[in-house]
Amino acid sequence: MGDALLRYQSRFCRSAFRYLGNAADAEDAVQDALLSAYKRIGQFRGQAAEFAEHIHRLVRQLSPTLRRTFQLRELDGLTIRETANVLGMAEGTVKAQLARARTRL
């Protein structure tokens, strides 16, 4: 669980900052949420596994291009810019592909 937290913590903080408008409040909110999730992880592991398999099954049905874009951005947590660099395409193209992938999912 530690690696996942490190990978997504900055993303969580950015999202919280957009809602709260204050970096310190955003960090506190993320810490509270992560602690709460950790305390209750045993309650949702089974449901999360069923849900994760469902998402993976749907993602496998996407075209290879949309699947790779979705994987890098949504599952691996890369930014739009990082995803565009990895795929060698414009950021606008990445955004369009993500929109298509989300619609199909």
Image (spheres, helix red, strand yellow):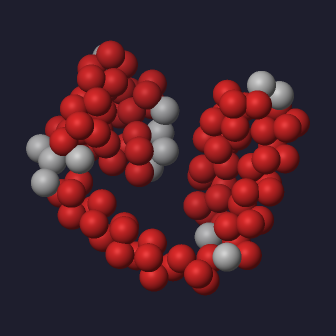
Give me the residue at 62% from left, 70% from top. 1
Q: How many marks?
A: 0
Q: Position of residue 82 (x, y in %)?
A: 45, 31
31 lies above or below 27: below
Q: Position of residue 56 (x, y in %)?
A: 27, 62
Which residue is at the far right? 24
Q: Quadrant of residue 94?
A: top left
Give whichever of 4, 12 is nearer the camera. 12
Q: Quadrant of residue 103?
A: top left
Would residue 2 be found to the left or right of residue 103 on screen? Answer: right
14 lies above or below 54: above
4 lies above or below 43: above
Give me the residue at 60% from left, 50% from top. 8
3 lies above or below 14: below
Would residue 7 be found to the left or right of residue 51 on screen? Answer: right
**Is residue 88 visible from the viewing direction of this image?**
no
Give me the residue at 12% from left, 44% from top. 63
Q: Position of residue 4 (x, y in %)?
A: 58, 61
Give me the residue at 27% from left, 23% from top. 96
**Is residue 74 visible from the viewing direction of this image?**
yes
Q: Position of residue 54 (x, y in %)?
A: 28, 66
Give whichever of 25, 69 is nearer the camera. 25
Would residue 7 be found to the left or right of residue 74 on screen? Answer: right
Give whichever of 35, 79 is nearer the camera. 35
